[in-house]
Amino acid sequence: MKRHLIAALAFIGTLGALPMAAHADHYDRGYGDWRGPSGYALFERDFRHAREGIRHGLRDGSFSRREVWQFRQELDRIRDLLDFYQNNDGHLSRREIRDIRRRFDRLHNYMHLAHDRGHEEQWWDFR
């Protein structure tokens, strides 16, 4: 009976260790990594879209040189903030991700307004 009790306790002990062993490789990556990419990989599409929008507005003449400079400056500020958040503790919190998303959304809206206004000025020949 004693042998069966010891064997049962040993078996139960190994059952508790199995889930930890199955996921042991995730513990050294940081607690935010399970959600997917982080840092630049998380915002790669946003950076690419903003750069393409700047090039488009410059190419079709709807952005002035000053607006292009302002948009690039804002994109650099977002990149610097992302670096700061990433280097602060090695991951991005939900608040930091929302902050970066909000800044991209605001830049995107400003770019669309400037693009539309630039085309209106071209149409009415205000420049």
Image (cartoon, rainbow, N blue to C red):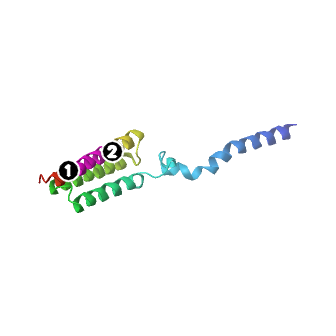
Of residues 104 and 114, the one nearer the viewer is 114
Question: Residue at point 20% right, 52% down?
Answer: 118
What residue range appears in magenta?
104-116
User: Which secondary structure lies at badge 2?
Assistant: helix
Q: Quadrant of residue 11?
A: top right
Dominant secondary structure, magenta? helix
> Residue 48: image x %, image y %?
35, 58
User: Which secondary structure lies at badge 1?
Assistant: helix
**Mark 1 belongs to which amino acid?**
Glu
Report whether residue 77 is seen: no
Q: Is residue 61 left or right of residue 104?
A: left
Taking the magenta stretch, the answer to whether it contains residue 115 is yes
The quarter of the picture where the C terminus appears is: bottom left
The quarter of the picture where the N terminus appears is: top right
Q: Identify the disc placed on residue 78.
A: none
Of residues 99 and 52, the one nearer the viewer is 52
Query: Mark 2 highlights which residue?
Result: 105
Residue found at the very far left of the displayed protein: 127
Q: Earlier in the sequence, mark 2 or mark 1?
A: 2
Establish if 62 lies above or below 98: below
**Mark 2 belongs to which amino acid?**
Asp
